[in-house]
Image: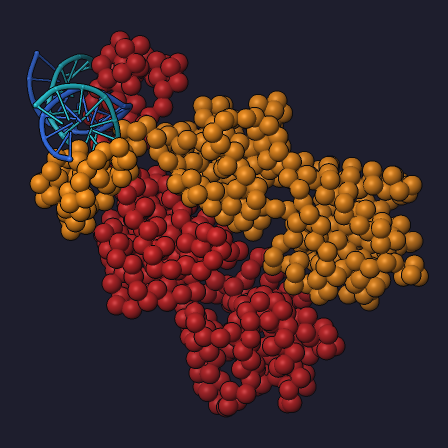
Chain colours: A orange, B red, C blue, D cyan
Amino acid sequence: MKDVAQEAGVSQATVSLVLNDVVGSGIPESTQIRVRAAASSLGYRHNALARGLKLQRSDTIGFLSDHITTTPYAVAMVRGAQDAARAAGKHLLILNLDLDGTSIDADAADLAISELLERRVEGIVYAAMFHTAVQVPDGLGEVRSVLLDAQSNGGELPSIVPDEYGAAKQAVIHLLDAGHRRIAHLTRPSGPIAVDLRERAYRDALLEAGIDLGGQHVEVGVDTTPGGFDTAMEALTRSPRPTALFCFNDQMAMGAYQAAAELGFGVPDDVSIVGFDDMSLIAPVLRPQLTTMRLPHYEMGKLAVECVLAPEWVVSRQLVDCPLVERQSVAPPMGAN
Amino acid sequence: MKDVAQEAGVSQATVSLVLNDVVGSGIPESTQIRVRAAASSLGYRHNALARGLKLQRSDTIGFLSDHITTTPYAVAMVRGAQDAARAAGKHLLILNLDLDGTSIDADAADLAISELLERRVEGIVYAAMFHTAVQVPDGLGEVRSVLLDAQSNGGELPSIVPDEYGAAKQAVIHLLDAGHRRIAHLTRPSGPIAVDLRERAYRDALLEAGIDLGGQHVEVGVDTTPGGFDTAMEALTRSPRPTALFCFNDQMAMGAYQAAAELGFGVPDDVSIVGFDDMSLIAPVLRPQLTTMRLPHYEMGKLAVECVLAPEWVVSRQLVDCPLVERQSVAPPMGAN
DNA sequence: CTGAAAGCGCTAACAG
DNA sequence: CTGTTAGCGCTTTCAG
């Protein structure tokens, strides 16, 4: 910058003023042009480190994730976060906690948070997908932090979470409305908070419709396509067999399609299926296309950084809606007309 | 740091020395302990901005991507890059060029590179997946940069690219070895350099096996699951019909499975299928599991940042191997035994 | 309208 | 073994 000043024949301060487009500084056009010309001819680049040091502002926000960024679910989330950050002129410093694919421990989280804090991030979004962030790491208290797809016990941090309960209920009601009575729930073992919430929603919806399946139609397995295949096989070979399947995610739903095919059942004629997530690689490309609950990852990511960047800091839990995406995998049960 | 010094009753310089574990500075245990205690009791955090300014080193490397990070292909790539960065004590500053999902233009790339440069990244990896980076943006010359899954015309930048040609050839040879003669290629329109390379490999492999299909078995469509369905339908209803399908990616292969099912053809009994990518959401979970060429995204991401961080700066094109992942979608053609 | 100067927090000579 | 000091590149107040 000193060089630029010399080249343009002005002082360094002047250079700073014009390069930052400072408003109140009535610097004449002619000088401005001269300065800019000098800057570009010297290939000058602002030094964000020095600027940040002086301004005590890094223009960076940290994005910490469990295992989420490395998962197909997540790309939309970081996209949303990036878009929101960029809109505010900030950058995202993304850190994954499961670097080598191994499980994460509390120390790793603390370390990552330290690194973020050392870089003076202006906020942290902690995307602990699938997990109840039971214990909020200490460091998060030092800067504006929001929990994404996770929530703290004490509620000391704002959080953005999908309305799992509402979505699951809506899914089951959709099936109920189509006329189904025997609806199986293909799910996975407890752990992620989502599974219990959805399970409860499933039961509540059934109960409210006056149906008591006595839990016989809950099939617990692995939340992958093969897991979906196995659990669907199990469910569809029971007697009486369910006429509809509500799956924990689209991958399990895909497995359910395979099981139906194997058993010679048509979707949706013989069995209706609804998924969860609306994964672009699966839901819209299955045949028939899968009706599913859309998990609005993009919006959640965006909301999270908007929350961090908001003028006033409000700590609240924001429930985000998961809309039903109706496609072709649901029909009235056979014989129902 | 000054506060810590005061608290510990030493000078600020001493604090710096102990907190950085400087080797040659024989600072007595007792002082070290006192300093560390003071630091942690005051909740002191190193300021990376100041440190970077002083050291002229940001410990950050930029990761620029076309649309890659936001795509399921890419997560492994950034994982690899992050792992390599972390191993070297660096962080990744990830920027996407297709922020709002719209197409990218040269200006966006230049802008992003400027932002990275202003933050004094120590290197840039430009992941221009699927694209020939015809024109290398100017800014890349100012810092160590490597092209990921792309290559520059002039070869002025090192690049890490998959061996598309070799992989495609291997795929076709695998089919040939199984006894297939009529092998169709389900592909997409030109654009990404990969399509032409693979197309050529397909033809060469056939030619070398003494087969001349006259291009009748090349089916061009959209590189998605529905696109795969359509092109496979087309291919499988020709006469004579191909006994094997080599697909541009796993998504098209998934579509091909659907088409086969629709036509009543069994995989692999009536038709063998090989994909490309080894997408975890698809290849291992299809029934039967898909034989495919693995695109080693993780390794490529890792290689890219290792290249940037290498002690000596070498400009070369690194071809990475795409191994055949044999699963269950290939068998000898009917009647071949 | 422009320049001089202080200082952001840190590191690394160098001196004591 | 520890303290003093200069300066990294920038912004901004205050004089001129």
Does B276 sit above or below residue B82?
Answer: below
Does A7 sit above or below residue B51?
Answer: below
The answer to whether B127 appears left or right of A292 in the picture is left
Q: How many marks?
A: 0
At 28% from the left and 43% from the top, the residue drawn is B118
Q: Decide which of A326, B311 is in the foreground and name it.
A: A326
Does A21 sit above or below residue D15?
Answer: below
At 79% from the left and 58% from the top, the residue drawn is A330
Could you tell me residue A291's position as x and y percent?
72, 56
The answer to whether B167 appears left or right of A200 in the picture is left
At 48% from the left and 52% from the top, the residue drawn is B100
- The quarter of the picture where the N terminus of chain A appears is top left
Does B207 sit above or below residue A180?
Answer: below
Could you tell me residue A302's position as x and y percent?
52, 42
Could you tell me residue B72's position as x and y percent?
53, 55
Q: Decide which of A248, A258 is in the foreground and name it.
A: A248
In this orientation, does residue B281 appear? yes
Could you tell me residue A141's position as x and y percent?
49, 23
At 55% from the left and 75% from the top, the residue drawn is B221
In this orientation, does residue B76 appear? no
Residue D16 sits in which quadrant? top left
Residue A279 sits in which quadrant? bottom right
- The quarter of the picture where the C terminus of chain A appears is bottom right
